[in-house]
Amino acid sequence: MKKRAMNSMKGCFIRSVVFVVVWLLAAVTARADLVIVEPQTADVTPSGFAVIWKVADSAFPQTGVAATPRIAVFSDMAATVEITSELEVTPIPLYGGDPGAIDEYHRETGIEDLRDLAQDMGIMKIGVHGCLPQTTYYYRIFSDNGADTVQWPESGVASVTTTQENAFVIDSKQVLVTLVDDSGTLAPQGWLVTASTSDAIYPISSYVGDGCGANQAFLNLSNLFDADEDNWTPTGVKIVTLQVRSSDAEPVQRGLSLFYAGDFHISAVTPVEINMDASGDTDPPGVQADPPGGLYNAAQSVTLASDETAYIFYTTDGSNPTTDSNLYTDPIQVDTTTTLKVFAVDLSGNQSAVETILYTIVYNRPPFEPSAPEPADGATGVSIETMLRWQGGDPDPTDTVAYDVSLGTSDVNMSDVCSDQATGSCAPGTLDFGTTYSWQVVAKDDHSGQTAGPVWHFTTFAYDGDEDGDGLINEEELSYGTDPHAWDTDKDGFSDFEEVGIGSDPLDRTSIPPYPPGFGDLDGDQDIDGADLAMLVSAFGSGAGDEHYLAVADFNADGVSDQVDLEMFSRVFGYAFYPEYDPAADFDGDGDVDGADLSRLVAAFGSVEAVPESGYDVDVDLNKDGRVDRWDLALFSTGYGCLAP
């Protein structure tokens, strides 16, 4: 019995040991392997620092698990001299507590509750104080959950160097971050928010709910230190990166633009809202300039605007702007040709590309001085129906020019005859015969610029004078509508006087006298003079077949040179032919009425318009009667050999 009892007890003991071993193995198997996620040194000051991290299950590194933070601080890199006990170490340091607490007890209770929340979510922070300025410290951090302990770094130590003494911050800013989500059920108390910049050596951190609302975190940016280990004292716009560390997700990051004026400012609180369900603003702002770049003839006041709330920076010296460049606040005065470069930074820190805008300022130049007058300055024998002409213009190609013309009988006795003329011509109306006139043109542009030309002079012809020597006095020329300065107004080879006397139209080239060109010029010297009269007299009274008969003196071709021929001759006696360059006879348009043009007329000679196959050429049909004949040859001969003026 005793042996059986002993065996029974031995069996129970073995079964108990097996059970304990199995239980321990199961416990070990089920126990989580802790890991430290995203460790970071923060809140470094001359007298202390903090380390923040998240402790998680290695199988779920983004999900925090409850743990207790610890730190070991050493004075040497080999970690042989631990000085943790010489310093003030605070796990989960909190400073503000519940702002709604009515007494010290409730305030302390709120701090403990918030500390418990952070530890339960595995959002770790440990503060170390009592340090010396500009001193390097070495540390390891630990987290344990009662069953497991994890350290970082796994080997060796991390280091941090405290900053030098605090400096006075003239432009202090504080940020109040409010966390929301689309459902409105967010419970972020105990989460950790950090703020960092590109030129601050360490971030600063704050727990959500510490000294502010349950979904808010308060950050004093005066606690940032720059690379010189002085308090961060920026100017211009700086981008602050905010990061939210929660218990069960990747950190959420947002940008924040803050403007520092660089002079003394009382601490200002900048509110920021972060929607944890939204991806955040990643679109750069756009910038528009009014007026746009281009060519202008006056100074411009340029207004810059963004399509969202943003800071706009610019330069006018051609360099690329930065956040330290000119901040746009008022319209930019552009007085000379300027390259304006601009870019914008929105409140989320998104930056637009640099845009280059060129303003070319060419101040208004006055119009050119009017020149090249017609009639020419000092001209005489000018028609009383003359048209005043001149040349002008403006050196600014976009300007519009108009002209005012004044005219009178003396330099001090002129009155307006044309106003706001768009072209360089003016019809002053019928002038007086034999009168000297003064006239002046004033050019005006559409930017109030103006230039007065010199005073010019001309004298009109006398009413009884004969400027062209065709036998019609000037007054008669005007009454018939012919040109007082042209012997043959219609250029048909017959003088105006001759056509008026015979009854053909001196203004119609196709209306010609019933006798050929050159009529009366018996010796062909282009002058109807006494020599021609002598030839006519020598043949007077003779008939065809007589010794003295001249066919060229028988103008009516009746076979006898008689009184009728003498009367016809008397109409043109005393006049000379004045051949002029006639572009109508310059068939090839080379400025010379020459053999080439004559060859073209000869090729078509005898052709008629009604018979196309005859080789009719409308250009050489100078009198436009539908045939190329001796009349066209006669008309051509009056200009043969002449050159273009």
Image (spheres, rainbow, N blue to C red):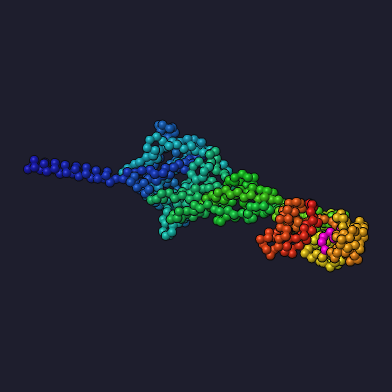
**Quarter the N terminus occupies:** top left
Q: Specify start and end residues of the magenta stretch as a single range.
A: 515-521
Which residue is pictured at 84% across the width and 56% down the height? Answer: 578
Q: Between 541 and 38, which is closer to the camera in this rendering?
A: 541
State left or right for residue 602 relative to residue 386: left
Res. 279 visible in picture: yes
Locate residue 46, reporting x and y percent: 51, 39
Residue placed most toward the observer, 578 or 198: 578
Give the answer, above or below, for where 39 lies relative to 533.
above
Residue at 84% of width from left, 55% of height from top? 376
Front one among 158 and 589:
589
Q: Quadrant of residue 71?
A: top left
The reply to whether the magenta stretch includes residue 456 is no
Can you say whether 635 is above or below 362 in the image? below
Q: Check if residue 517 falls in the magenta segment.
A: yes
Q: How far across and down, in percent of the image, does residue 205 sit?
A: 47, 47
Report x, y in % for residue 591: 75, 52
Prevailing SS of the magenta stretch: loop
Image-based side of 198 in relation to 460, left or right: left
Where does the image place residue 542, in percent across and percent down from the top left? 90, 62
Q: Is residue 19 left or right of residue 6?
A: right
Seen as rendered, the residue at the extreme left is: 1
Instruction: Determine which quarter of the picture holds residue 3.
Output: top left
Question: At 79% across and 65% down in the image, what residue appears?
Answer: 511
Q: Nearer the viewer, residue 224 or 248?
A: 248
Which image quarter: residue 624?
bottom right
